[in-house]
Image (cartoon, rainbow, N blue to C red):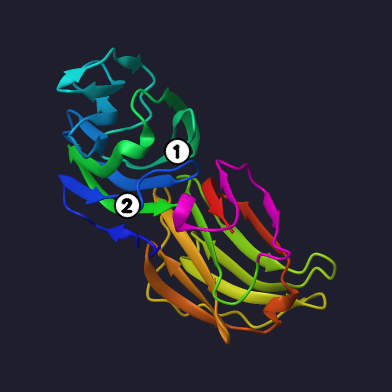
Amino acid sequence: MALQQPILNPCVPFCSPIFGGLCEGKNILIQGCVIVSAKRFSVNLVCANGDIAFHFNPRFDEGNIIVCNTQEKGCWGPEERTSTMLFQRGVSFQVIINIRSCGYQVSINGSQFIDYRHRLPMNLVQTLQIKGDVSLSCINFTGGFNFGGMTVCNPATPFNAILSGRFFPFCKIKIMGSIPYSADRFHVNLKNLLLGNIALHVNPRFKEGALVRNSFINGAWGSEERNVAFLPFCPGQAFQLEITYLENCYQVLVNGQLKFEYVHRIPPSQVDQLEIDGDVILSCVQY
């Protein structure tokens, strides 16, 4: 089945089919910003017959609450309400809806928020709909049929994962998260666990305004690569970083746009560990 590519800067109201439908382990990533004058917005998982299996509805005009519900045959069911409002007017956000066998697990800006039990079978859902007082920067569908390997949601930092048997030509590593307002720097390393060598070191430095790339070989750093038009990460905003292992280099995309290619200094066959640490909040890592 073909991958459903990230949808960048879509208009609102937004409506898109979900290729392959929903299945356990699939994730829906939504990055955007709440409009300064926002009253409310909604995220809906819609069935072919128009029923809404999951309605996620932050309301600023009703006491700063978030309402979740299901609409079947034109009638709303009992609301599930929470007074914990994790969105702010004028502030960027990241929502991940993790599809589970028992329900929809929702995290906001890396924090687990709610588990909403299925009221309609998830295999009836065909469409994602977003409308209201919000602008969108990225919509992505990952996991399930769309991505092999491991998916880890809301991991703590430092994050370490063993890549043995998973890291081979054309494979991808996807990292989704957000940057704290007070961030100084964070890094992503592709390493050799035994020797401590780092094949690829990706190091956004916010005070320097630099995106540093390097390798650490036999106890010493090599020459830094810094050439990039602008730093594609921003404190207070969500991001998606994708690393693809190609024959001659690593290809790195941020928010769906190619930012740099890094020619191999260490054979990628030696890479067996992914390491992420620093000033970053992780919402999902796939490898």
Residue 147 spot, x, y in % from top left: 49, 58
Quadrant placement of the C terminus: bottom right
Q: CA distance from mark 2 to mark 1?
A: 16 Å
- Front residue of this view, candidates 216 and 112: 112
Q: Residues within 10 Å of mark 2 (few under 14, many from 20)?
A: many
Q: Is residue 162 left or right of residue 259?
A: right
Helix, strand or loop at label 1? It is strand
Residue 152 spot, x, y in % from top left: 58, 46
Q: Which labelled disc corresponds to residue 99?
A: 1
Residue 149: in magenta span: yes
Q: Is residue 273 above or below residue 124?
A: below
Q: Residues within 10 Å of mark 1 (few under 14, many from 20)?
A: many
Q: Label 1 near label 2: C-beta < 8 Å?
A: no
Q: Amino acid at mark 1?
A: Ile
- Front residue of this view, candidates 235 and 143: 143
Identify the image quadrant of residue 273: bottom right
Q: Amino acid at mark 2?
A: Ile
Quadrant placement of the N terminus: bottom left
Please report the residue visible at 60 percent of the width from the left and 53 percent of the height from the top.
150
State whether residue 68 appears in this view. Answer: yes
Q: Is residue 232 above or below residue 152?
A: below
Q: Is residue 114 above or below residue 63?
A: below
Which callout, 2 or 1, points to the residue nearer the camera?
1
Residue furthest to the top in view is: 78
* Magenta-highlighted residues: 144-166
The residue pinned by badge 2 equals 139
Please report the residue visible at 21 percent of the width from the left and 30 percent of the height from the top.
51
Q: Earlier in the sequence, mark 2 or mark 1?
A: 1
Residue 63 spot, x, y in % from top left: 25, 15
